[in-house]
Amino acid sequence: MIKHHPTFELLQSFVNGDLPASLSAGIAIHADMCQECQRQISQLTDQIAEANFEFEANFLDRFIIDEEKDLDEIATIDFDDMIAGITASDEIEVLKEKEDKFISFNDTNYKLPDALHNMVLGKPAQIGKLSRSRIQLDEDEIHSSLLHIKPGGGVPEHTHKGFELTLLLDGSFEDEQGTYVKGDFIMLNSEHQHHPVSEHGCLCYTVANDALHFTKGINKLLNPIGSFIY
Amino acid sequence: MQTNLLCKETNAKSIKMSDEIDHPQLCLWLKAVSENRNKQAFTHLFNFFAPKIIRIARSKFPNEAQANEVVQETMSNVWRKAHLFNQDKGAATTWVYTVMRNVTFDMLRKVKANKEDNLSDDIWPIAEGLVSDDDAYEDHLETENLKAVIDNLPESQREVVKGFYFMEMTQEQLAEKLNLPLGTIKSRLRLALAKLKVKLGENHD
């Protein structure tokens, strides 16, 4: 059973679209496997949507003193023009069945999570029982990967200078804190030190940043919706 | 003085207004857009959402033109995707919000990471088990990615790579055109390929 979930603040930032693609994908993959988080996300989306579209009224009350100036600002786009332009086209969005994609590690095929379908994966690099394929998201100090551990393999004891997300896509692993299973969303920071080992092998999605940007990165994550509401 | 009075008045009114987002009406308009391509209904939706979207976008993008693009993109998607709105699954405000959030997410990625990979529909799917029918997408993505990596090479290596792979010139032709010894062309190409390999993921760091 899944025991490790994203924090409420992370879910909030996810719904707001404030997280980098790497962490957003991590939460989307977790939510695909976790009904409880799925439910929370849809509830939060309702609330945030409502708050956003009521926002104008509140915003006006708080900040707008010179109403005429405000109207001028809005008028920099011609709404009628835009409406005419949009409705001139009769095209509608056409959908097709999603096709599963697979990735192979150690002669085993794994289904690629939907959230990663259009990300570019690097060729796997092997170090002992570990294979790692970088995901090319170009998010500066944040690196995302698929990490495969063969049975009996592990990651040497390490601490995290920034944050490290490990999302178990398949299999299980153990560390000093216990056993982790498919779907577990494990977010560690510099306070944690661990030495994960996978007795039966596993595939993980990992996201980590680096020490230099620790404060910035973490602050970003913990900063909830911020400017939207105030 | 007068401004203050005005503010108070707006205040009292708006508290009442915010309780009055007319959800059933928004649903009806969306339905009319989806079933009859009803422009009048779309205009109502536009007038309700567009000013709000602009304000929200201005808080996320410093640039006014980008905020306007969010409105343009979001409302185009509302027009093109209205048939995907399912009122049993949630309010119209929720649906439009997700459309706007996805547009914003992809645009921010374009601005910040210079990536046009439009990941939002994979992260927040518009419809379960379905994706946009856009066959050429994947190849396009790979090409874009490769181009971006090549563009980051030093000028001297970039021209050799582009000449050799994109214009299909031989190393000899390149040496002649660039007025460089053949050995220099070869070593630049080798250096460039090593860098590309690292960038494209064959690194062991």
Image: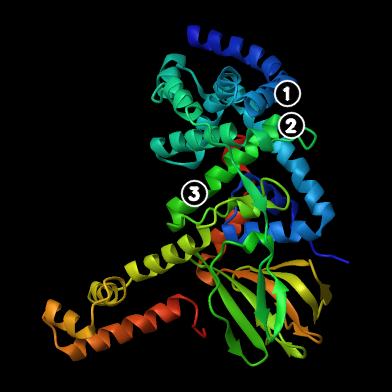
Question: Label 3 to label 2, Cα distance in Å?
Answer: 26 Å
In the image, what residue type sits under mark 2? Ala
- From the top left corner, tell me how far across and down residue A215 is, in percent: 56, 61
What is the chain identity of the residue bearing mark 2? B
Can residue B1 be seen here? The reply is: no
Q: Around disc 1, counting alpha carbons within 10 Å, would you say few (fewer than 14), some (14 to 19), or many (20 or more)?
A: few
The residue tagged 3 is B108
Q: Around disc 3, counting alpha carbons within 10 Å, would you say few (fewer than 14), some (14 to 19), or many (20 or more)?
A: many
In this rendering, is residue B74 above or below A21? above
Q: What element does badge 1 sit on? A: helix
In terms of image quadrants, where is residue B52?
top right
In this rendering, is residue A212 above or below B135? below
Question: Label 1 to label 3, Cα distance in Å?
Answer: 29 Å
x 48%, y 64%: residue: B139
The residue tagged 1 is B23
What is the chain identity of the residue bearing mark 1? B
User: Label 2 near label 3: C-beta < 8 Å?
Assistant: no
Question: Label 2 to label 1, Cα distance in Å?
Answer: 7 Å
Residue B91's disc is: 2
Residue B170's disc is: none
